[in-house]
């Protein structure tokens, strides 16, 4: 858009310069810029606009430039004073333009500083949030460690309780053995005293003794089984504790993995949007370059016909009163130039309409570009391997 406007302004200023050179060339020089304003009221606004951009276009003031190309000449003292006044006006306009630009630069600097302060404040808040998150994680880790200590203490107490019960069982067993020994001695004394008893009584006593022995062995086997069961429960408790520790460690690793995946995903989406926007801007810029090149070519044709029109009008005015043939020829040239100028205007309008009609095609091209960008990002943003869950 800006390139198109600059081209139009430059062409228009060149056209004005050509008109002034043709009107005031040779010996018919203007005495001052004020005189040019007075002689050309229909072009005053455009000449003044050209004067405001004179430094950018010609590298000097408009009055000085018109003197350089022979449009303004110093013929007397009054003309010299008028030229000096024109130059002062031009310098005032240039100073006003420079002050305006300085003011815009100052405002831009203030806006930049405000943006830097805003970013610094956002960075400070982000740092505070990060520290708060670290403190929260440290507190969670401390509580988890205390929980592990509590469970270890409970396991130690349970183990002491098992030892106490085992000691009680051992004492009970010794008491049984002691009682059995006392019973055996009493039985021997009874047998000594009852030696004379019948064989049937001896057999009955023997059977009773054997039965007592079987009961003792059965009791020992029961106690051994009870000890084995207690030992297996201890092993099972240790295995359960080990599995809980592994699961807890897996949960921490899995949470870290999820955060990493989310971070990689967010980075990939951000990069995808950036590349998508860059590609869209490239396509739009290519379309604008094509439009500007076509418009420039047509406008060059327009300038050529405008010059032909000016030349024909100038020649027509210089012809004699009775030069009808020359006048017809120049009128035909003027009509042809005006028709060509109208054609170039229509061509410029057509190019602009074609540009507007081609803009929707960018959305169609972007569909395939989205797929390409997605594929390229899949190879660049690979997710980390997930932690293995314990069996």
Image (cartoon, grey):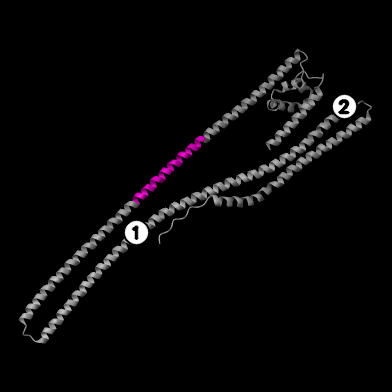
* Residue 196 place in picture, x, y as percent: 5, 85
Mark number for residue 337?
A: none
Seen at 17% across and 69% down, the residue is 173
Q: Nearer the viewer, residue 299 or 34?
A: 299
Residue designated by label 2? 317
* Residue 17 place in picture, x, y as percent: 77, 26
Seen at 68% across and 43% down, the residue is 286
**How many residues crowd mark 1 within 10 Å: few (<14), some (14–19), many (20+)?**
few
Give the position of the N terminus as an image quadrant.
top right
Report the Cα–Cα distance between label 2 and label 1.
110 Å
Residue 117 visible somewhere in the drawing: yes
Image-based side of 116 in relation to 35, left or right? left
Magenta stretch, main secondary structure, is helix
Q: Secondary structure at mark 1?
A: helix
Q: Which residues are magenta?
A: 116-143
Q: Looking at the rendering, which quadrant does residue 355 occupy?
A: top right
* Residue 130 place in picture, x, y as percent: 43, 44
Seen at 66% across and 44% down, the residue is 284
Q: Secondary structure at mark 2?
A: helix
Spot the residue most to the top: 77
Residue designated by label 1? 242
From what the image shows, is residue 296 above or below residue 205? Answer: above
């Amino acid at each position: 858009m800006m390139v198109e406007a600059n081209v139009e302004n430059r062409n228009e200023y060149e056209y004005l310069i050509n008109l002034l050179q043709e009107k005031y060339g040779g010996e018919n020089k203007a005495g001052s810029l004020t005189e040019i304003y007075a002689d050309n009221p229909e072009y005053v606004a455009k000449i003044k606009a050209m004067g405001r951009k004179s430094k950018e276009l010609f590298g000097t003031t408009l009055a000085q430039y018109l003197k350089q190309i022979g449009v303004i000449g110093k013929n007397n003292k009054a003309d010299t004073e008028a030229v000096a006044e024109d130059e002062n006006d031009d310098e005032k306009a240039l100073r006003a333009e420079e002050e305006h630009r300085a003011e815009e630069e100052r405002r831009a600097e203030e806006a930049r500083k405000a943006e830097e302060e805003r970013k610094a404040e956002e960075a400070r808040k982000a740092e505070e949030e990060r520290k708060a998150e670290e403190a929260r994680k440290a507190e969670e880790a401390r509580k988890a460690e205390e929980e592990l200590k509590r469970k270890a203490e409970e396991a130690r107490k349970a183990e002491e309780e098992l030892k106490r019960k085992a000691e009680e069982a051992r004492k009970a067993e010794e008491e049984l053995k002691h009682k059995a020994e006392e019973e055996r001695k009493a039985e021997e004394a009874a047998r000594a005293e009852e030696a004379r008893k019948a064989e049937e009584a001896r057999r009955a006593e023997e059977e009773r003794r054997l039965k007592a022995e079987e009961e003792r062995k059965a009791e020992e086997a029961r106690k051994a089984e009870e000890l084995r069961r207690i030992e297996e429960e201890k092993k099972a408790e240790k295995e359960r504790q080990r599995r809980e520790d592994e699961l807890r460690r897996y949960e921490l690793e899995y949470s870290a993995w999820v955060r990493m995946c989310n971070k990689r995903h967010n980075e990939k989406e951000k990069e995808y949007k950036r590349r998508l926007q860059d590609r869209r801007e490239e396509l739009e810029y290519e379309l604008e370059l094509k439009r500007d090149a076509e418009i420039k070519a047509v406008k060059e044709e327009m300038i050529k016909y405008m010059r032909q029109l000016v030349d024909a009008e100038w020649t027509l005015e210089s012809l004699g009163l009775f030069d009808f043939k020359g006048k017809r020829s120049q009128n035909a040239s003027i009509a042809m130039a005006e028709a060509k100028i109208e054609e170039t205007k229509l061509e410029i309008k057509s190019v602009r309409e074609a540009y507007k009609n081609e803009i929707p095609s960018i959305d169609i091209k972007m569909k395939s570009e989205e797929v390409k960008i997605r594929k390229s990002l899949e190879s660049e943003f690979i997710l980390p391997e997930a932690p293995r869950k314990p069996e």
